[in-house]
Image (cartoon, helix red, strand yellow):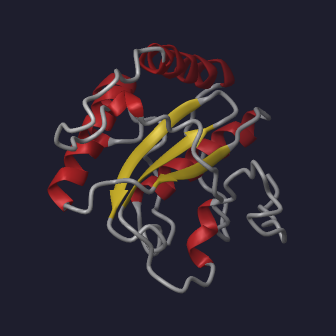
């Protein structure tokens, strides 16, 4: 398999850019056959499609206290897509508190849900999810299957850490995002192996 050649285009030029996860080595494959990989994705998509079809929100009271949004009120599939290397850019600030979602838009399925207090810095350094995604993309490349993994940020997350983490947890359990450890019992761990890229 050929080494990955990162794109020279900016995020603006890549309207629906596939996440490059541009690291200088080839990730190990997950060891799934093409039919097993497609079946795994279909099971995740079937479950998440049911979640996405749930009623979103009802008319609220204008004078009621502000409450946190329901997990199904946030649609991770419609957030602006960003390349995973976005954090390598130059930013004038560290970013705001946010929830973020790693999505394979080819299927589509939500792979991972996370939260951060500094959206422009979250992916710097080591993050286990980078390895899972690298393995996931590599498995698709091995079998010649299309894949389009991107990250989207929801910038309306609560500033309060406990409230933000509670909403993150609710989203993880609602969507059963397969790369979050809390959901490994549902989907297995076919993409966890290998070294974590920096």
Q: Is residue 83 above or below residue 120?
A: above
Name the spot of residue 35 as percent of width and height, x first.
Answer: 65, 18
Q: Is residue 38 above or below residue 133?
A: above
Q: Check the image and name the residue furthest to the front.
A: 63
What residue sits 58% from the left and 52% below the top? 134
Q: Is residue 3 above or below residue 64?
A: below
Quarter holding residue 36: top right
Residue 177 seen? no
Quarter holding residue 9: bottom right
What residue sits 21% from the left and 38% below the top? 63
What residue sits 49% from the left and 48% below the top? 132
Name the spot of residue 80 as percent of width and height, x first.
Answer: 62, 50
Q: Number of labelled discs?
A: 0
What residue sits 73% from the left and 40% below the top? 142
Q: Nearer the viewer, residue 60 or 190?
A: 60
Residue 104 seen? yes
Viewed as shown, does residue 47 lie left or right of 85? left
Q: Nearer the viewer, residue 23 or 52?
A: 52
Name the spot of residue 168 as percent of width and height, x first.
Answer: 29, 45
Viewed as shown, does residue 40 lie left or right of 173? right
Q: Is residue 81 above or below residue 49?
A: below
Quarter holding residue 185: top left
């Amino acid at each position: 398999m050929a080494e990955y050649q990162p794109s020279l285009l900016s995020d603006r030029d890549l309207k629906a850019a596939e996440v490059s996860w541009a690291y200088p080595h080839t990730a190990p494959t997950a060891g799934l056959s093409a039919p097993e990989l497609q079946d795994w994705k279909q099971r995740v998509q079937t479950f998440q499609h049911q979640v996405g079809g749930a009623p979103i929100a009802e008319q609220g009271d204008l004078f009621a206290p502000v409450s946190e949004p329901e997990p199904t009120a946030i649609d991770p599939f419609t957030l602006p897509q960003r390349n995973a290397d976005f954090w390598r850019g130059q930013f004038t600030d560290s970013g705001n508190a946010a929830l973020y979602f790693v999505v394979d838009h080819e299927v589509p399925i939500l792979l991972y849900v996370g939260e951060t207090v500094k959206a422009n810095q979250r992916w710097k350094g080591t993050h286990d999810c980078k390895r899972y995604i690298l393995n996931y993309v590599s498995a698709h490349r091995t079998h010649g299957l299309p894949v389009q993994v991107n990250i989207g940020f929801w910038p309306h997350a609560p500033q309060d850490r406990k409230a933000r983490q509670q909403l993150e947890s609710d989203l993880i359990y609602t969507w059963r995002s397969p790369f979050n450890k809390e959901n490994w019992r549902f989907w297995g761990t076919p993409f966890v192996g290998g070294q974590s890229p920096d």
